[in-house]
Amino acid sequence: MDPTSLLTDRYELTMLDAALRAGSAERPTIFETFTRSLPLGRRYGVVAGLGRLIDAIEAFRFDDDQLAALDDDDVVSPATLAWLAGYRFRGELHAYREGEIFVPGSPVLTVAAPFADGVVLETLVLSVLNHDSAVASAAARMVNASGGRGMMEFGGRRTHEQAAVAAARAAYLVGFDGSSNLAAGARYGVPTLGTSAHAFTLLYDDERAAFAAQVAALGPRTTLLVDTYDTTRGIATALEVAGPELGAVRIDSGDLGAQARSARTQLDAAGATATRIVVSGDLDEYRLAELVDAPIDAYGVGTSVVTGSGAPTSGFVYKLVARARSLGGPLEPVAKAGGSKATVGGRKRAGRRLHEGVAVEEVLRDWHSHVPAAERELQVPVLIDGARRHDPDLAGIREHHRAALAELPEQAYSLAPGVACIPTRHQPARPVPATAISEEASP
């Protein structure tokens, strides 16, 4: 992985420079990442990007070229350049698992480290978690609205090329079946899907020739795109070419519900009862909910799962919540004032209180408190002493997401405007020993 150290904002390094000059850079600190509110109308969010973030933190290095660029731009002092040359993250990370549900106030990532180590990671943490969690949260709503049908992510052409890879991973971990993005398959093992677009059909003199070429290459179990000219005629031609063993037809335009019903009738009458119907074309969770009664087997979703309109930012912030006055002093809660942007000081331990298996409350208490048996503890150690303690594969993340989602109350699945499905309750924080920074600090 290429170095990630310049994927940051200038002021992170100028804060570091000032702290090193003042002798405060080594003070023990606690940073927490959380959101103050969910996007309008959302009932919950889904954590995603933690695995990518840990990769990026491990690659957070300053090589000679990067240090020279900082020097040329006079970003920091020579002494700080020397410090950056040897940078390796020395702190600890605890976090919510990927696939976990979050609500306002949830401390989805906690960084315990000297100020210098923690402050330089702010932009990187927020870039990864805000993007991936936004996609995962939108994709989870779509999976829920699909009624158990197949879900394919087709959004790569609607976003930045690298964001497309991350988006495919985030959509897959909450229940999409795969992605059209080959880089996501190669990098993360996301199943890749897809056959042809309208350009392939338009290349040939007629639809029959296009279908014959595709079937010759991919076999009769392929998916044929049948709406280039006329959907009914396209299905008839597809059956003539591939026979009743045709794998699927895809419809990408028009009244998708009506066309799916007509297509099902036509396919069944021709004996192609096993041929699946796939639809695509500007779908989002609201459109999926409208199509729940149509005979559709799978959906292809693109723009709405990867862009701001469908996947608004999670709104995560990265705030200092505790610091020691000196290297050996106790950690003291600190908080920002300022109305809606005020923060709650102190390191927090998060538990989700359950009643008969249903989540009723998220409780945030002092880090050194115990989580009672009626609650499920939400944070796990991720990086301790430079070693990964938590590194699940995508199959494990998908399984955890399904379990976390199953705990939510029924109103969580509503697409109507509403508030977070689980309230958050803060218990008072208290100062803790600075030595907790170097402890795994399990209760």
Image (cartoon, grey):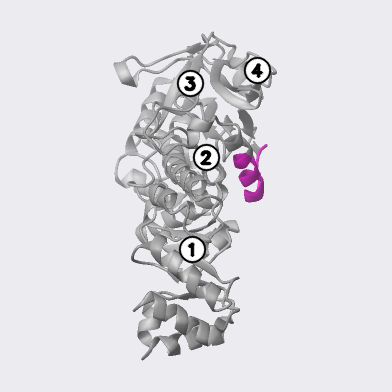
Is residue 244 found left or right of 19 in the rendered image? right
Instruction: Please tell me whether mark 3 or mark 1 is closer to you in this view.
Output: 3
Q: Which mark is residue 181?
A: 1
Alpha carbon separation for disc pair 3 and 1:
37 Å
Which secondary structure type mostly characterizes the magenta part of the structure?
helix
Q: Which amino acid lies under the numbered mark 1 shown in the image of this protein?
A: Asn
Q: Secondary structure at mark 2?
A: loop
Q: Which amino acid lies under the numbered mark 3 shown in the image of this protein?
A: Pro
Categorize mark 2 by other alpha carbons within 10 Å: few (<14), some (14-19), many (20+): few
**Residue 133 position within the rendered picture, expressed as x and y whole percent measured from the top left:** 47, 41
Q: Nearer the viewer, residue 134 or 143?
A: 143
Q: Is residue 379 above or below residue 202?
A: above
Instruction: Please tell me whether mark 2 or mark 1 is closer to you in this view.
Output: 1
Q: Which mark is residue 86?
A: 2
Alpha carbon separation for disc pair 3 and 4:
17 Å
Q: Earlier in the sequence, mark 2 or mark 4?
A: 2
Report whether residue 26 is seen.
Answer: no
Q: Which mark is residue 158?
A: none
Is residue 81 found left or right of 54 in the rendered image? left
Q: Secondary structure at mark 3?
A: loop
Q: Which mark is residue 423?
A: 3
Q: Which amino acid lies under the numbered mark 4 shown in the image of this protein?
A: Val
Instruction: Please tell me whether mark 2 or mark 3 is closer to you in this view.
Output: 3
Q: Quadrant of residue 91?
A: top right
Q: Secondary structure at mark 4?
A: loop
